[in-house]
């Protein structure tokens, strides 16, 4: 345990001990012993860094290995340099030590570049912007004096190469730091050491050329800070995070932008207060800084402009760009009486099934594939837009009526080809398309889009997978639908507007009343009493059908409880359930309502059309808890939907309701009689009861009795009546039919 704790804190133990030794080197009088303290620290740094590399084991270690080699070369250079000074010799400039130092620069620069390679182009650009002013100042303070100070060409080369090499090292380290946003302490230690190195190198070059360098002064402290801080970075556990994740993000944050603009203003501001003999480096540096900032801004500005006008997932135009292009297309229409602006409003049918079954990632992949097919299907110059979700719009800026129809057909045909989903299965896309064309120069873009949307909803209402052209009647219907939706939402909060009447159900063999079906009505303030066909589709389309079901269920169970209190008999009651309510929340609503009224579960039947049986897993998840509680399930309008006898058999529902289209006329039509006979026989074979709907003729009722149908309802037997009427029927002397 002691060893583990010691290793865990090794980085700060090294930092404290090495910093103390460096401070002693500067504070104590310089002598032979302190000279070797400097050398010892610089030679221990690569060993300490290698220990940190082995202990922390980063996934990408090549960059650190190269840095360790650079530290070792720097240590060798210190040994060579100390060999001169310890013997009282003045080292030549350049010396062998300077060669090792230059190799150290190259190695550490290469290591920092390897670590920073994944930072992305923007990190290197930002680093260049920040360091450009320092490069210009270094040119003025170091390179320019070389012209007047003299010296050999080799001396001049080494003199320039040392600080230039350190600047390159600093450039790569700064790119690394910007790539990880300085979040890792190890990066901060590394960057601090390299900055100290750059400052000391620049000062040493100047003092060497002027002959003013003295060993053991503060300038040596910067050289010692470099290996000390780099080794601290290598020993610190955060060194595993010094390699940034590969980045393609070009977002320019506010803080980063202020940093870049501030760096670009350094040289112009400095030029206001400092007038060097040769201002060329300042001017050139300022221009380079501005050019680099401009280059840095190109991609973010382009990305921002694209994000403003394009969908992030598919890359298609978004609503804002669509409306701009639509207004321009209308304003550019030629006055030839033939050319029009066309809109195709496309909605993907049954897309929700993909999200529910395979997840949203698979749904996103499908949307991207569909976007590609839409691009390929339209004409050059047409604009494909994604409004959101599974809704797409195609703008045809200049098109004839015939061409618009042809594009719509081509889009539908191309999307009808199978698309491969994430699970390997094929998806056959179906589009409901609304087509709107205009030749009005002053047409309102919002109105045109709403008109195309209205036509699309008409296509869905007509059975999906088709194209419907907009006409003036469509706009009237859309306005009525919007008003109806607003009125219906208000009705949900106003008790009494929505009420129930009850259709009695009789036993066929003896005519006894056995149950009732709750049928909703709406007492509209201005339109009078409305039937379900006038408002249930609106509730389903706008998502209020769940609230509507809860209102009908509560009212029905309340009346059922009243009948029980009057007669002591639980009269079974059936309530219609929309396929859009097939979710786990429905079971919670029903069970809570049963508990509030004290109704036994077997006294409630939920009626679901065949359309709702299309997704067996969804049906089981929604209705399974209710069936286990005792609630009965009836298949409504059987034979008119998916004709899914296998699905009915798999679920084993309680009642099959034979649609009135198979009941009316069975006494005169042998084919209808045969179909009804097959349905009743199938129900009995599966252990279900059969109930005939819409019985309006006595001869049809007699045939149903002959075929063995258990229950019937229809105007022949009784019209829907209110709760009071049911009470009177229950308390009256039983009448046979």
Image (cartoon, rainbow, N blue to C red):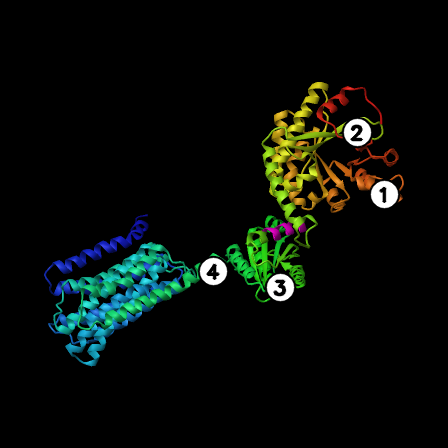
Q: Is residue 453 magenta?
A: yes
Instruction: Measure the C-alpha gap from mark 3 to mark 4.
Output: 30 Å
Residue 672 is marked as 1
User: Where residue 137 appears, x then y in whole percent?
Assistant: 22, 68
3D distance between C-alphas at marks 3 and 2: 60 Å
Look at the numbered discs 1 and 3 and tell me whether their residues touch, using CB distance below 8 Å.
Answer: no
Q: Nearer the viewer, residue 434 or 252?
A: 434
Closer to the eye: label 1 or 2: 2
Q: Is residue 703 above or below residue 403?
A: above
Q: Mark 4 — residue? A: 306
Residue drawn at 81 percent across, 33 percent down = 710
The earlier-in-sequence mark between 3 and 2 is 3
Q: Residue at x 68, y 48 (%)?
A: 461
Q: Quadrant of residue 431?
A: bottom right
Distance between the alpha carbons at the discs numbered 1 and 3: 53 Å
> The C terminus is located in which quarter?
top right
Q: Position of residue 435 (x, y in %)?
A: 64, 56
Q: Which residue is mark 3?
A: 339
What is the C-alpha distance between the residues marked 2 and 4?
Answer: 65 Å
Magenta span main SS: helix
């Amino acid at each position: 345990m002691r060893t583990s704790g010691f290793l865990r804190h090794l980085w700060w133990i090294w930092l404290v001990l090495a910093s103390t030794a460096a401070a002693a080197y500067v504070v104590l009088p310089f002598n032979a012993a302190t000279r070797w303290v400097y050398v010892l620290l610089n030679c221990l740094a690569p060993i300490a860094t290698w220990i940190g590399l082995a202990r922390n084991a980063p996934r990408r270690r090549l960059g650190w290995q190269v840095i360790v080699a650079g530290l070792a070369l720097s240590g060798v250079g210190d040994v060579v340099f100390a060999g001169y000074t310890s013997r009282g010799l003045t080292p030549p400039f350049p010396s062998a030590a300077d060669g090792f130092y230059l190799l150290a620069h190259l190695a550490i620069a290469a290591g920092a570049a390897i670590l920073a390679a994944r930072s992305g182009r923007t990190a290197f650009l930002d680093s260049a912007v920040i360091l450009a002013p320092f490069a210009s100042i270094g040119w003025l303070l170091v390179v320019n004096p070389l012209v007047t100070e003299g010296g050999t060409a080799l001396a001049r080369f080494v003199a320039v190469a040392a600080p230039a090499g350190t600047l390159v090292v600093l450039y790569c380290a700064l790119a690394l730091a910007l790539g990880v946003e300085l979040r890792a302490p190890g990066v901060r230690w590394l960057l601090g050491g390299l900055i100290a190195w750059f400052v000391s190198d620049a000062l040493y070059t100047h003092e060497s050329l002027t002959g003013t360098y003295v060993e053991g002064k503060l300038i040596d402290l910067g050289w010692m800070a470099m290996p000390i801080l780099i080794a601290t970075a290598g020993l610190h556990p955060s060194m595993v995070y010094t390699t940034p994740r590969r980045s393609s993000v070009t977002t320019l944050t506010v803080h980063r932008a202020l940093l870049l603009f501030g760096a670009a203003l350094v040289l112009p501001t400095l030029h206001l207060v400092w007038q060097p003999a040769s201002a060329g480096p300042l001017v050139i540096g300022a221009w380079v800084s501005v050019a680099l900032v401009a280059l840095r801004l190109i991609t973010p500005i382009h990305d921002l402009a694209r994000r403003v006008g394009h969908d992030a997932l598919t890359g298609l135009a978004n609503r804002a760009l669509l409306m701009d292009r639509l207004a321009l297309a209308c304003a550019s229409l030629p006055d030839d009486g033939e050319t029009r602006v066309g809109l195709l409003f496309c909605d993907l049918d049954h897309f929700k099934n993909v999200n529910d079954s395979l997840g949203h990632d698979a749904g996103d992949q499908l949307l991207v594939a569909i976007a590609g097919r839409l691009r390929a299907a339209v004409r050059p110059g047409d604009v494909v837009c994604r409004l959101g979700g599974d809704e797409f719009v195609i703008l045809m800026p200049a098109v004839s009526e015939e061409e618009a129809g042809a594009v719509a057909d081509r889009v539908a045909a191309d999307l009808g080809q199978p698309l491969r989903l994430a699970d390997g299965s094929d998806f056959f896309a179906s589009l409901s398309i609304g087509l709107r064309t205009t030749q009005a120069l002053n047409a309102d873009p919002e109105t045109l889009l709403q008109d195309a949307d209205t036509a699309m909803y008409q296509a869905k209402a007509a059975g999906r997978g088709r194209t419907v052209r907009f006409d003036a009647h469509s706009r009237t219907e859309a306005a009525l639908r919007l008003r109806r939706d607003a009125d219906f939402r208000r009705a949900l909060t106003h008790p009494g507007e929505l009420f129930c009447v009850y259709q009695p159900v009789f036993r066929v063999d003896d005519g006894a009343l056995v149950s009732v079906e709750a049928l909703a009505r709406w007492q509209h303030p201005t339109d009078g009493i409305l039937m379900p066909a006038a408002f249930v589709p609106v509730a389903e389309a706008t998502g209020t059908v769940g609230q509507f079901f809860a209102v009908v269920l509560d009212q029905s169970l309340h009346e059922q409880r009243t009948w029980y209190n009057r007669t002591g008999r639980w009269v079974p009651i059936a309530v219609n359930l929309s396929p859009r309510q097939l979710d786990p929340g429905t079971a919670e609503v029903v069970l809570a309502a049963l508990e509030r009224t004290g109704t036994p579960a077997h006294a409630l039947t939920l009626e679901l059309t065949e359309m709702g049986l299309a997704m067996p897993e969804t049906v089981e998840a929604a209705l399974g808890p209710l069936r286990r509680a005792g609630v009965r399930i009836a298949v409504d309008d059987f034979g008119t939907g998916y004709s899914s006898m296998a699905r009915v058999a798999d679920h084993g529902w309680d009642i099959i309701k034979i649609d009135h289209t198979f009941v009316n006329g069975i006494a005169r039509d042998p084919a209808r009689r045969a179909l009804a006979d097959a349905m009743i026989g199938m129900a009995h074979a599966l252990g279900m009861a059969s109930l005939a709907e819409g019985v309006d003729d006595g001869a049809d009722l007699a045939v149903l009795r002959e075929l063995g149908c258990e229950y019937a309802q229809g105007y022949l037997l009784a019209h829907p009546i209110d709760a009071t009427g049911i009470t009177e029927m229950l308390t009256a002397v039983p009448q046979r039919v």
